[in-house]
């Protein structure tokens, strides 16, 4: 495939990567696996087989990549658009010091690139003096396959941020395909707490809810 290739889709030393031959011809976008396979530069050495059938080891190439700011891998296709959505989960009526888990079903593929949260008391009582609202609960997030995006629950302010300064998920962010789900766990540290979580998502939209 000829034409412009953005820098973040180039191989080592700026070599153009190989896309599937039918990437543009097909009405369906390439899959995540095909995009990953496409990231092999032209002329990259292919594994050779020993007589025993075991693949010979190849040297590992390290390449610098920006991590702090989000750099999501976006599918590029005439029939695909990228749209923003704020997905909000609200937790209320929770038991003090006991985790409440809520699942979010993903119906459109996309990537979470930031998260924010806020909390208040349902009886309008004041928060403890000197404590930020994000310090009134613990939080964790995992995929439906059990993959923990936080190794354990942590104080909200250590993982999340307010909407004015959200938690930025650097690199490729948290990528989710259609039919995946997100499990968010919140543990209130004060009574009568209401917590709102917002996931900032960049969705991949096509003529139908396509798998990518």
Image (cartoon, helix red, strand yellow):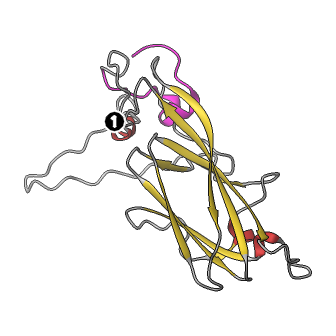
Q: Name the quarter where the C terminus is drawn.
A: top left
Q: Does the magenta stretch include residue 62?
A: no
Is residue 74 visible in the rendered image? The answer is: no
User: Is residue 68 placed above or below 153 in the rendered structure?
Assistant: above
Q: Quadrant of residue 147?
A: bottom left
Q: Does the magenta stretch include residue 14?
A: yes
Residue 176 horizontal/vertical position (percent): 46, 48
Q: Quadrant of residue 111?
A: top right
User: Is residue 37 placed above or below 67 in the rendered structure?
Assistant: above
Residue placed at 37% from the left, 26% from the top? Answer: 19
> Is residue 90 rendered to the left or right of residue 204?
right
User: For this rendering, which residue is in front, 37 or 125?
Assistant: 125
Residue farthest along the left direction in this orientation:
51
Residue 137 horizontal/vertical position (percent): 70, 76
User: Is residue 61 placed above or below 9 in the rendered structure?
Assistant: below
Q: What element carries label 1?
A: helix
Q: Name the quarter where the N terminus is drawn.
A: top left
Q: Quadrant of residue 22?
A: top left
Residue placed at 78% from the left, 52% from the top? Answer: 163
Residue 40 horizontal/vertical position (percent): 38, 36
> Is residue 209 rendered to the left or right of residue 7?
left
Residue placed at 65% from the left, 85% from the top? Answer: 96
Magenta-highlighted residues: 1-21
Task: Return the residue at label 1.
Answer: 34
User: For this rendering, which residue is in front, 172 or 63?
Assistant: 172
Is residue 121 visible in the rendered image? The answer is: yes
Residue placed at 38% from the left, 27% from the top? Answer: 29
Q: Main secondary structure of the magenta part?
A: loop
Residue 108 horizontal/vertical position (percent): 46, 40
Are there few (<14), some (14-19), or many (20+) residues within 10 Å of tag 1? some
User: For this rendering, which residue is in front, 126 or 31?
Assistant: 126
> Is residue 9 rendered to the left or right of residue 51?
right
């Amino acid at each position: 495939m000829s034409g412009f290739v953005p820098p973040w889709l180039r191989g080592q030393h700026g070599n153009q990567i190989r896309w599937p031959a039918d990437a543009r011809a097909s009405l369906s976008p390439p899959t995540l696996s095909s995009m990953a396979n496409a990231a092999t530069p032209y002329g990259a050495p292919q594994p050779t087989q020993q007589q025993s059938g075991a693949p010979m080891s190849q040297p590992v190439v390290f390449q610098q990549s920006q991590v702090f700011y989000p750099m999501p891998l976006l599918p590029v296709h005439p029939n695909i658009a990228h749209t923003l959505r704020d997905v909000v989960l609200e937790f209320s009526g929770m038991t003090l010091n006991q985790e409440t888990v809520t699942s979010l079903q993903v119906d459109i593929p996309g990537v979470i690139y930031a998260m924010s949260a806020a909390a208040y008391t349902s009886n309008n009582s004041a928060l403890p003096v000197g404590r930020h609202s994000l310090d009134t609960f613990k939080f964790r997030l995992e995929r439906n396959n059990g993959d923990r995006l936080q190794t354990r629950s942590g104080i909200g302010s250590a993982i999340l941020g307010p909407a004015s300064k959200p938690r930025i998920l650097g690199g490729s962010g948290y990528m989710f395909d259609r039919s995946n789900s997100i499990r968010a766990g919140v543990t209130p540290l004060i009574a009568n707490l209401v917590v709102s979580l917002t996931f900032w998502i960049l969705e991949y939209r096509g003529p139908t809810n396509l798998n990518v």
